[in-house]
Image: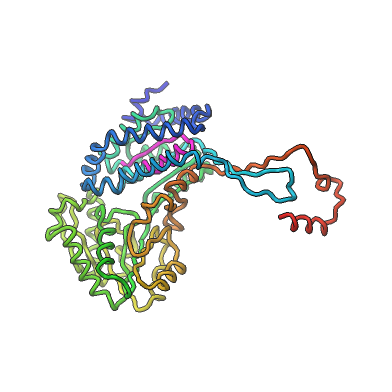
């Protein structure tokens, strides 16, 4: 036997296969499949998270300098809501779904059963290091799987408290959290899992996908991209500016669904910029560096990447930075070079390019010429314009007259499309994501149908009529 505490605190890469073998053995015991077991584990996780609330908030402040309100609303509270919903709805989710059976299959009944895949791997990112590690874990446990968690080493304080919570809540043969850097992730990806869930960038997502393909392992990839924010001339400019500013500069723009650029009707471009400047000042004061509501950039590498973007256009607001503090003020940019890195790469920081358009079809074409984004935002009082944008563009999700909030509703599946990801979760969708939908047909021995057996005596003409009539 390996020493579980030693493995989880300072993982020996050679011991990973044995840990996975232990989890496979535990899953094979069938213990994870009962409603009572799953519900008890979710309740225990809820208890442990609540007990460590202040430490979690402190860790998020240490890693990203998140204000406790922002940290609770976007991370801790988000996870607790998901947990409560899973605990309440699990009996309903687990119940087999009865479906119709064609008449030519008489004396039979059909149903769909949700069964766990087995051993799951969840790799979390650094930008929402608590939410995006634990939210998928809720789905994995609710569905009856075991789990290996790999938190991001770029958010070390949150990684540490997450590992402590997992150690206190679960034995490692059921759920284990392996801290560490790239070498740990690489070692894990060499192993065979039954399901892999990854949140991060497209570049690494492709590596995950290639590793999963070696074992034909199903995956969910929650990636990102350049999420557009389209502003129609017929809109409430004050509310629009306020909501864009909030959605963009929450977590200092380090949000996978943050508005990445604004497409605004040229008739209202200048009034929108003026109002956004007022809203930035209202939110973060005359000197945003002194505001406790503005997070910081995660590390020096990302800070330097963002500073380089400032040369790709004209700065309309902000543009101030302090390297030692990894501070970058909320920044609006105009006259941007569309071929520059600013408009070719996901920004993932507090810089917002603003681009004008001449007509709605031109704006839609601009969006469609680029890879499909994780989110799309449209601000307009014109329902026809809104519907046209939604109908003629593709994105993982969309929000009308606001930003980010579609992710908060647990009844809406959240996920990407195309370059922005594969698969969707939250609420019941998380349960379904980590469950194989097994089709089951049950038939009685009482009556048999002789026409299907050889030697065949029924002509195809009558077979077609029979099958058409009995659907």
Farthest top residue in view: 1
Residue at the spot 29% in from the left edge and 78% down from the top edge? 267
The residue closer to the viewer here, 408 or 9, is 408
Colouring chosen for the image of the structure: rainbow
- Magenta stretch encompasses residue 142: yes
Residue 289 percent across, percent down from the top left = 14, 55
Residue at the spot 39% in from the left edge and 32% down from the top edge? 176
Res. 170 image quadrant: top left
The residue closer to the viewer here, 227 or 58, is 58
Quarter the C terminus occupies: bottom right
Quarter the N terminus occupies: top left
Residue 219 percent across, percent down from the top left = 48, 46
Residue 19 percent across, percent down from the top left = 43, 29
Q: Number of labelled discs?
A: 0
- Magenta stretch encompasses residue 402: no
The residue closer to the viewer here, 77 or 342, is 77
Relative placement, left or right, of 228 versus 329 is right
Span highlighted in magenta in the image: 134-152
Q: Compared to 52, does 415 lie above or below? A: below
Residue at the spot 59% in from the left edge and 44% down from the top edge? 112
Relative placement, left or right, of 216 versus 384 is right
Residue 260 percent across, percent down from the top left = 32, 62
């Amino acid at each position: 036997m390996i020493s579980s505490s030693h493995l989880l605190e300072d993982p020996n890469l050679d011991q990973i296969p044995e840990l996975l073998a232990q989890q496979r053995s535990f899953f094979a015991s069938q213990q994870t499949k009962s409603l009572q077991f799953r519900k008890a584990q979710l309740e225990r996780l809820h208890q442990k998270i609540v007990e460590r609330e202040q430490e979690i908030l402190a860790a998020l402040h240490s890693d990203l300098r998140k204000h406790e309100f922002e940290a609770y609303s976007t991370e801790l509270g988000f996870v607790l809501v998901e947990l409560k919903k899973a605990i309440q709805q699990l009996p309903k989710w687990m119940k087999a779904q009865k479906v119709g059976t064609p008449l030519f299959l008489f004396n039979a009944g059909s149903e769909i059963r949700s069964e766990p895949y087995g051993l799951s791997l969840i790799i979390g990112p650094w930008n929402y290091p608590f939410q995006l590690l634990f939210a998928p874990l809720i789905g994995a446990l609710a569905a009856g799987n075991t789990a290996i968690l790999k938190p991001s080493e770029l958010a070390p304080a949150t990684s540490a408290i997450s590992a402590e919570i997992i150690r206190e809540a679960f034995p490692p043969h059921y759920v284990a959290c392996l801290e560490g850097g790239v070498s740990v992730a690489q070692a894990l990806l060499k192993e065979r899992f039954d399901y892999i869930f990854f949140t991060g960038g497209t570049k690494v997502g492709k590596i995950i996908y290639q590793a999963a393909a070696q074992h034909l392992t199903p995956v969910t990839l929650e990636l990102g991209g350049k999420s557009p924010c389209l502003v129609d001339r017929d809109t409430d400019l004050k509310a629009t500016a306020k909501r864009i500013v909030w959605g963009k500069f929450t977590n200092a723009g380090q949000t996978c669904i943050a508005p990445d650029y604004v497409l605004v009707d040229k008739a209202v471009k200048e009034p929108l910029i003026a109002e956004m400047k007022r809203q930035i000042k209202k939110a973060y004061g005359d000197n945003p560096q002194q505001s406790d509501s503005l997070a910081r950039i995660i590390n020096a590498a990302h800070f330097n990447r963002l500073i380089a973007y400032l040369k790709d256009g004209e700065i309309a607001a902000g543009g101030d930075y302090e390297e030692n503090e990894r501070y970058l003020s909320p920044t609006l940019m105009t006259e941007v070079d569309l071929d520059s890195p600013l408009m070719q790469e996901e920004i993932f920081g507090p810089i917002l390019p603003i681009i004008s358009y001449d007509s709605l079809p031109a704006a839609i074409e601009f969006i469609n010429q680029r890879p499909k984004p994780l989110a799309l935002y449209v601000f307009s009082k014109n329902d026809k314009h809104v519907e046209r944008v939604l109908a003629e563009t593709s994105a993982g999700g969309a929000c009308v007259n606001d930003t980010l909030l579609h992710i908060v509703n647990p009844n809406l599946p959240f996920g990407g499309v195309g370059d922005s990801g594969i698969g969707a979760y939250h609420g019941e969708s998380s349960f379904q994501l980590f469950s194989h939908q097994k089709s089951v047909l049950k038939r009685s021995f009482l009556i048999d149908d002789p026409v299907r057996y050889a030697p065949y005596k029924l002509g195809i003409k009558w077979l077609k009529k029979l099958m058409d009539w009995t659907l």
